[in-house]
Image: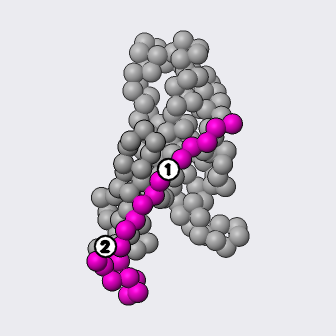
Amino acid sequence: MSEHTATVEWTRGDQPFADNRYSRAHDWRFDGGAVVRGSSAPSSVPEPMSDPAAVDPEEALVAAVSSCHMLFFLAYAARVGLVVDRYSDAASGTLAKDARGKVSMTEIVLRPRIDWVGEGPSAAALADLHHRAHESCYVANSIRSDVRIET
């Protein structure tokens, strides 16, 4: 068992607040020192209250699932002697009403593209690597969303 932490910090500054037109921009601070600018999604709260250049929670969830899947995939590929030169994933998530009638991330689609050194695995071996990575991914195991992998 392990614990993972993040500090999320927002300050009002001199902005009005009660009119609901305050900035949603804030910082995510991680134990290794990384700071990521966060904000609500402009599709949820329009500019200028949202910062479109910042990472919104919905994007972060999609990135976390993609990153977790990739890290397990790379580990499993290395274990069977395959060498990955580049891994790129154009992942996306769909925010919609779920079966409970609540707005949630109902689906995340991973679209990994892998460049191999030498000959890559067969289609069946590739599918098995993705299956094992998906089954092992802590983040995917923690959410209700369907996660699909399109290779």
In magenta stretch: residue 128: no
Tell me which residue sits at (59%, 14%) in the image.
Answer: 80
Tell me which residue sits at (54%, 12%) in the image.
Answer: 81
Q: Which mark is residue 6?
A: 1
Describe the element under mark 2 as helix, strand or loop: loop
Q: With respect to residue 63, does 56 lie above or below?
A: below
Q: Most extreme residue toward the bottom, as rendered?
A: 19
Colour scheme in the image? one colour
The residue that mark 2 highlights is: 13
- Kindly check if marks 1 and 2 are in contact, taking CB atoms under 8 A apart as contact: no
Disc 1 versus disc 2: distance between alpha carbons? 22 Å
Residue 141 seen in this snapshot = yes
Tell me which residue sits at (32%, 63%) in the image.
Answer: 52
Instruction: Magenta stretch: give its range.
Output: 1-22
Query: Position of 7 compared to 137: left or right?
Result: left
Instruction: Depth check: give the residue in front, 25 or 73.
Output: 25
Q: With respect to residue 6, does 25 lie above or below?
A: below
The kind of residue on which mark 1 rests is Ala
Quarter of the image where the N terminus is located: top right
Instruction: Depth check: give the residue in front, 87 or 1.
Output: 1
Q: Nearer the viewer, mark 1 or mark 2?
A: 2
Residue 139 position by quadrant: top right
Tell me which residue sits at (49%, 39%) in the image.
Answer: 67
